[in-house]
Every structure is written in C-alpha cells, then in structure tokens.
Amino acid sequence: MMTIATVILAAGLGKRMKSKRVKVLHPIAGQPMILYSVETARRLPSDKIIVVVAHQADAVKEVLANRPVEIVHQGRPLGTGHAVLQTQSLLAGFIGPVLILNGDVPLITVETLQSMLKIHRDQGADLTLLTATLSHPEGYGRVIRDPDGEMIAIVEEADATPVQRAVQEVNPGFYLVNAPFLFEALKKLKSDNAQKEYYLTDIVKAAVRQSRKLRAVSAQDPAEVMGVNSRMDLARTEKALARRIAERHMREGVTLLDPETTWIEADVAIGRDTLIYPNVRLEGMSRIGEDCVIHSHTRISNCRLGTGVTVKDACVLAESVLEDGTAVGPFAHLRPGTVLHKGARIGNFVETKKTEIGEGSKANHLTYLGDAVIGKEVNIGAGTITCNYDGVNKHRTMIEDHVFVGSDTQFVAPVRIGRGAVIGAGSTITKDVPPDSLALSRAKQEVKKDWAKRRKKVKGKR
Ligand code: UD1
Ligand code: CA
C-alpha cells in the first residue's frame, strides 16, 4: 500500500456554534469531535498525521496528547487553504499523496477513505475528491461540472449563483492531493471571495487549469459526510452516530427495544443476549456482560457489569462494579467506588458510595451506605444509614458476614459489627458490636393503658 501523509484541519473557531468552546472539541457520543477524524486517520497507512490548530490550541493539544500526531499552528486562521499550507515544512521532501480531512466531519469511515485511495492510486490521479449528493445541500461547497460531466470547480455557498446553489452534489471536505502539486497550488491561492479566505477548494480550479488528472469518488452513505457547523448539525451527527453504534451492537447480538432512544457511547462494550429497554444511556468505558437486562431511564457511566445483571428502571450508576447476578433498582444511585459482589441486591431509593457489598447481601429499601464494607449474606433493613461524615472526616462502617440489620438503623462510623450479629430496629449504633450478639439502642417502649380512651372522653368524642 502506498503511504500517505494525513492533514486534519482543526483550527477554526466554529462561529456558527455560538460557543465558548472551539468546535472540534464539542463532544459527540461523549468523545471530542476531533478524535473521530484522528482515530479514522490512524487506521490508514499514514507516514504521519498532522493536525492544524489555532483557536484554543492548548486545549486541542491536550485532547490529542497521547495520540501519534504532529501539531501545526496556523496562527490566524485565514481559511482552509491557508491551514494546509502551514504543513509544508513538516512535509518537506514528501512527494506522495496528502490526505486532507476537515476536522468537523466526524463520521467519515475508513472504508470510504480507502476507496478514495484506491481510485487515486489505480488511476494515477493528481487530485481525488470525495463528493456526496444530498437532498439538502445547504451549507456545503457545491461541485460544479462541465456539460461533459467533468468536475471543474467547487463553489462555496457564499459565492454561489442561484443556479450553482441548486446543485445537490457537494464537497464534504476530503481530498487526496499529490504533495508537489498541492503546495504549488496553495501558494497561488487568492482570497478574493465572499469570505475573504484562502479556500482549499480552489485547488480544483488550479488542477483544471493545469490539466491535472482529477477524480471524484462519491460517498455512499450521506450520514458519513455530515459536517458540523451548528448545534443543529451537532444533534444530527450525534443521532446518526448513535444509530451506527446501536446497529453495531444489534449485529453483535444485543437486543435494543428502541434503538432510537438508546444512547450508547463509542467505547461501551455489551455482551450477547443483553436486553436494553428504551431511554437508556450507557457512557464512557462501561462494560456490560451477557444476559443483562437494563430497564428504562437508566444511566450507566464507566461501570462494569457481569453476566445476568438486572438494572430496573430509573437508576444512575457511576464507576461501579456489579458482579454476576446482581440486581439494582428501581430508583437506585450507585456512586463511584461501589462494588456489588455476586448476587447482591440494591433496591428502591438506595444510595451507595465507596461501598462494597458482599455476596448475596441485600439493601432493598431507602438506605444510604457510604464508606462501608459489608460481608456476605447480610440483610440491611429499610432506612439504614451509615453516618460516615462527622463534618470533618469520613469514617468507615464494617459489617461482617451474616449480620442482620433491623430497619431504621444508624451506624455512626467508625464502627464494626461482628459476624452474625443482629441489630434491633431503630438503633443508633455508636460502638462496635461483637459477633453473634444483639445490639439495641432504642428507648424502651412505654404503654399507658386506656390513656387514649380517657382523652377522648375529656374532649367529648367517642
Ligand atoms: C468547508 C469547504 C466546503 C465544504 C465543507 C464541508 C472550504 C473553503 N470549504 O466549508 O466546500 O463543503 O467544508 O465540510 O474549504 N479550518 C482551519 N483553518 C481555517 C479555517 C478552517 O483549520 O482557517 C478548519 C475548521 O476547523 C474545520 C474545517 O477546516 O474543521 C472546515 O472549516 P469550516 O469553516 O467549517 O468550512 P466550511 O464553511 O464548512
Ligand atoms: Ca464545516
């Protein structure tokens, strides 16, 4: 395979986004837009990948920090042609084809770029351009052809005549150009156009003038070439990517009852025969095992779920581990550092944080467990609270295997409950409890016989 050099354009601010943040750092499916182009480029045989930056250059560089790319500063971004020209010194001596990618068209596939490369090589072209035919070409440069169908120019929308605007064949922003011709043409660009910019697209006219060999490859899937210029484009792209990711998981054997409302970020992995209800978000590096069931209105970020885990409706799970056969929800909140060992259950309105729950243990109702280590087969009664914070420091609650905690118990940490102990309902536990004992700390109940009856008589009621 002929090697190429790749240039990714990421210097523009993206005025139409109306954002403090540079456009290429806006996330799509949880990942900054620029990383899509970079990761796609990495799958091609590139000698080097150069990213052109200007606006918020440091922030863009930080996002690219551990990627094998070189960075070029554009200074003042004077247009896409000016941007590519900045790579000249880094590409000195390189005579192969330069692949140029607009950094704001994230869904391009490596297959499409490979087909461009194949045509470019097989036909010995000087310039190969990707084109797409869209029913709504607004916002894109239009591909202008002569009566014989030969491509003769790309005209930006701002410069187009009404007849040119009616053209539906557009330039999505992907070019292969042989380096010597590219830099020679870039140096001759002028900015006498509606936007007073040096347009990369003007190299098409230069190629025609010099009778260079031009080729166009048409993109098959319009979703691939969606450019992000506005928040509307961002939403469309997010949706198209969500659909693409959802289909990948369905092909691999995951059931999504409603792919339209299931949002799965790019790096999430899901095992076969897992069933996902509508309106679920799976984020970050989450790993979901096989045969899990995830009900609606749940968000899972950076969690690891084993096999056969059930998450009932309306749960929020973050940075937690749920081993095989565990069950959570409805309405549970597992905060970072929660570990549920095999078969453990967390029920309604339970919040956990930095807490480990042993095999087969349960906390089924209205509970807060923070900084706690809970052993096997423990039953945590409704309304149990670990008082882990004294206003200054956090303290741990240790509950050993087979403990039974009655309802409405407070554990004032630090405190340790020995194996097999029983805590009476309504207790405030401030001291360690030895194994196999009963701890009770509630006031003794008093009963005043006939007291209520007497009161009613006084008030004249029956
Ligand atoms: C560009 C194309 C247009 C095409 C569209 C497709 C030109 C002149 N026009 O228009 O034909 O249909 O992309 O997506 O190329 N950038 C720089 N430095 C600059 C200006 C831009 O690096 O000085 C970067 C931007 O960060 C962005 C990309 O180049 O990633 C495209 O810039 P943008 O301003 O969005 O160009 P479009 O108007 O969309
Ligand atoms: Ca654009």
Image: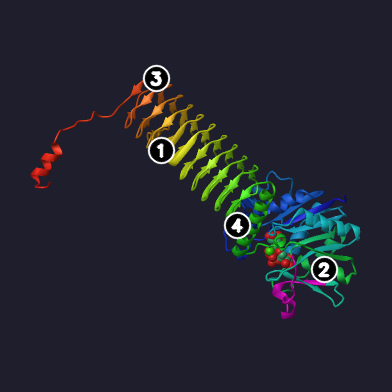
* Side of 232 relative to 401 (left or right): right
Quarter of the image where one finds residue 123: bottom right
Camera-near label (3 vs 1) is 3
In space, the residues marked 3 and 2 are separated at their CA atoms by: 84 Å
First in sequence: mark 3 vs mark 4: 4
In space, the residues marked 4 and 2 are separated at their CA atoms by: 40 Å
In space, the residues marked 3 and 4 are separated at their CA atoms by: 53 Å
Quarter of the image where one finds residue 26: bottom right
Where disc 1 sits, the SS reads strand
- Respond yes or no on whether mark 2 lies under 8 Å from ligand 1: no
Q: Residue at x 87, y 59 (%)?
A: 120
Which residue has dot 2 on it? 204
Which residue has dot 1 on it? 367
Q: In this view, does 453 lie above or below 16?
A: above
Where disc 2 sits, the SS reads helix
Q: Does the magenta stretch include residue 170?
A: yes
First in sequence: mark 3 vs mark 2: 2
- Which mark, residue 260? 4
Q: Which residue is drawn at 84% across and 69% down?
A: 206
Q: Give, as a single range, the part of the protein colored magenta.
A: 152-171
Query: Badge 3: how crowded within 10 Å, few (<14), some, or many (20+)?
Result: some
Camera-near label (1 vs 2) is 1
x, y (%) of residue 229?
64, 64
- Which mark, residue 436? 3
